[in-house]
Image (cartoon, rainbow, N blue to C red):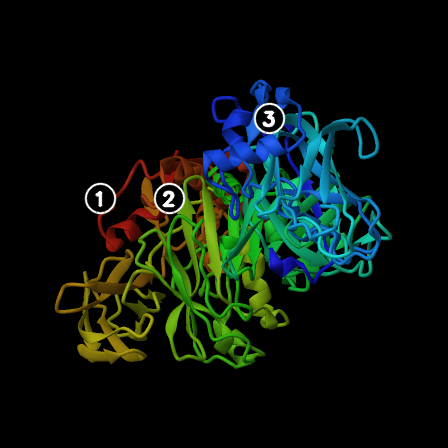
Amino acid sequence: MRRFIFAVAVFAISVSACSHAQPSSTATPLASPAALATTPLPEASSSPSEASGAASEASASPETSASPEPSATITATPNPNLLEQSNGTIVRAYPTGVSDPASIADNGFDPIQDTSPRSATFELPGVASIAYFQANLPVPLPSVSPETLDIAVSTTSATSGFQDIGTMRTKEDGSPQRLVAGVKARWVRVTSQSGVEGPTFQRLVAQGAFESRPAAAPIAGIYEQYAKVYDGGAYVPKVNDTDRFFRVVTTPDGSTNGMFCRAGVSFESYPGSFDGRYWRWNNPRDVDNGILVANDEGDRIVGDGMLLGRVPSGPDYCSPRASGKGRTGVLILDYGGDTPFYPAENPIDFRAYRFTRISDAMMEPQMLDRASIAVLNRVCSDSDLDLAQGRALMQWVAAGHKLIIEDADNCTKTSYALVPYAFKTSNPGAQGTRGKHLIIVEDDSLGSADPADSHYFVDTKAYLAGHNDLGDANTTTSSDPHWCGHLFGTNLLNVNGFMQMYAQYQNGVIIYTGLDKDDSDNPQYDRLEHLQMELPVGVTLPCSQKISLSFLVEPATTANYVPGRLSTPRFSMEVLANQGWSGSLTIKAVGDLAASVSPSSATMQGGSQPLTVTVTIPKNAHAVPHVIDVVATTASGTTADATITLEPKEIIAKKFTRIRVYGIHFDVDSAVIQPRSESVIAQIAAILRENPHLRLRIEGHTDSDGGAAHNLVLSQHRAQSVVDDLVHRYGIARSRLEPAGFGLTRPVKPNTTKANKALNRRVELVAL
């Protein structure tokens, strides 16, 4: 607990009353007073005869050794001496000449000039069953009255209700004195009388155990560490620095966390457990640990070198801070109150959201009830969270919510043990360095490389051309197959890797973003932030590129061709080593059209290898999508691939009963029609105008990615969008159009290859 000595602090503790009562089945019963009276302490006599002699020389009544064993539930003490501050005990009154009242139990009243009776009153944090008292008294000098030590206890108050227990006197051999008690006490008064100035008793011990804190006395409120607690012979806590505080959160199961905080700043978490009286904490960053003790009234928490008292209020940052008035709740968990979080600082740009910020260690599980999104903002390690907090967070994600992790610049290394899928990061730190490489590896709801995808398009070339600190970005690696990649780039350490990834977790989703928030003035960074905040939970994303890949082939490409015309389009691609991978590859292109790759082999030492892919499209190629798969393979069989999808520029026949249409495109996982589709929809409108009696069923069909229920709804919405476009843009009567969605239920080909899936993603027109 020594780390706390320098600071004034406040704790806010929130705990259910049910956590304070100790079940009798798990309680540690106090041994009988007679048994405890013979239990040796350091420096105490361990022989039965010596203990018996000590008891006989003390002027306690014979009945005290025969007191019945207490029936109340007992809490075992970490320190066997109940009078020590480490057990939560304070000194209510003491002689004014004592320089360190907290050390009276160890050092007595030395140095003292006053030879008159000297008295001190100890206040325990709760009622204790005390088996015996023990003390070391100085060896008497010739012609000087020996020191006597009177012991009295009270359960009433610090000033009344005291019961005399007995008197200890010095012995010629200076051996420790023991006084059998067998009583309950909350206050202990010791009075020393001696005929000479100089040393008094030392090593005063009250051996016993505390009863459990009352269940009706939960700890709650703000607690402040006092810089000075003793003055003028009394307990008079004072504050000399009100800018430093602590807040503590305790959950009903006893998990407890605290964090040092002051106005605008918080750091140093202390997760641990609370058994109703003892908070056993550890500081994961400093590998430190300690114990604090709560009193029965809940207005004081005391430990070795530390004393906290409840106060009415503390600084704002010890409590949640709110911004924005949107409907979607976002809980931001910070490490350090001065750590910016870009969306929360731009409530106008992110007006759909309502932000609540709190230090990560201060998170109370019920805060999650009001949020749809949680953000770990540069916390670097979830070790700041105690077990209950971490468990509550991941259960909340699994129930259908979104967790976003962002940690660039602040963290030299990261560790997220509570996340069910392990990963590591390469962290350059805050260097202010530009980056030259950023690729979207799959088109999805987190962002698309397709300029025609109006809602999801992210221009990575514009990102690189503008202000960027992509050199400072963190890249990730993981062997866990749950992680799917979205953004891939190269950081200052020249390490290729994923800068954004995601994983579905039961009904929720986890997103890791390693981009540097210093890019918040870059419009493309802003776009990416919007998209990850907007990402609907429950949507099954493609996961076309696994984080666990040793290397990637990029980018996937879609292009048009003119049916009936010979053409040989060329495409630029590259192989990218993931996290510095080294090895040899063979590269080929496979599909239903002839294609070649140059070079056809490569030896990688990290970095990348440019590729040129040439495809031959004959005149007689069927007017359907064709897929070329560019595959890189190691000698051991490890592969990575990317596809080139060639779609026909469609000319729809004027007469048909049923016809497949591939030229109508939608935004990713959306029913929004892309502008490039309008030429095809215009043809459908022209056919309807030329045939005024024609009625059409517009059918939507999907591949198997995303699940049956989701695709069924999506296909219905897409069919409806085509109908709406024909009505509103081209003036076709709605009564002539019938939308229908079939999802994945009517595939053209088995969904076993990328080419087959491309054929299954279609709109069909049926003449009615």
Mark 2 lies on a secondary structure that is loop
Disc 2 vs disc 3: which is toward the camera?
A: 3
Please name the residue that numbered disc 2 is placed on: 706
Disc 3 vs disc 1: which is toward the camera?
A: 3
Above-or-below relation of 148 to 287: above
Mark 3 lies on a secondary structure that is loop
Of the pair 137 and 511, the residue shown nearer to us: 137
Please name the residue that numbered disc 1 is placed on: 750
The percent coordinates of residue 125 (x first, y second) are 69, 37
Residue at the far front in the pictured view: 143
Earlier along the polypeptide chain: callout 2 or callout 1? 2
Of the pair 422 and 308, the residue shown nearer to us: 308
Residue at the far left in the pictured view: 635
Give amino acid for label 1: Pro
Give amino acid for label 3: Ala
Residue 72 quadrant: top right
The percent coordinates of residue 746 (x first, y second) are 29, 37
Q: Is residue 421 visible?
A: yes
Of the pair 430 and 101, the residue shown nearer to us: 101
The percent coordinates of residue 132 (x first, y second) are 60, 33
Q: Residues within 10 Å of mark 3 (few under 14, many from 20)?
A: some
Give amino acid for label 2: Gly
- How many numbered marks does the figure carry? 3
Name the quadrant of the C terminus. top left
Please name the residue that numbered disc 3 is placed on: 21
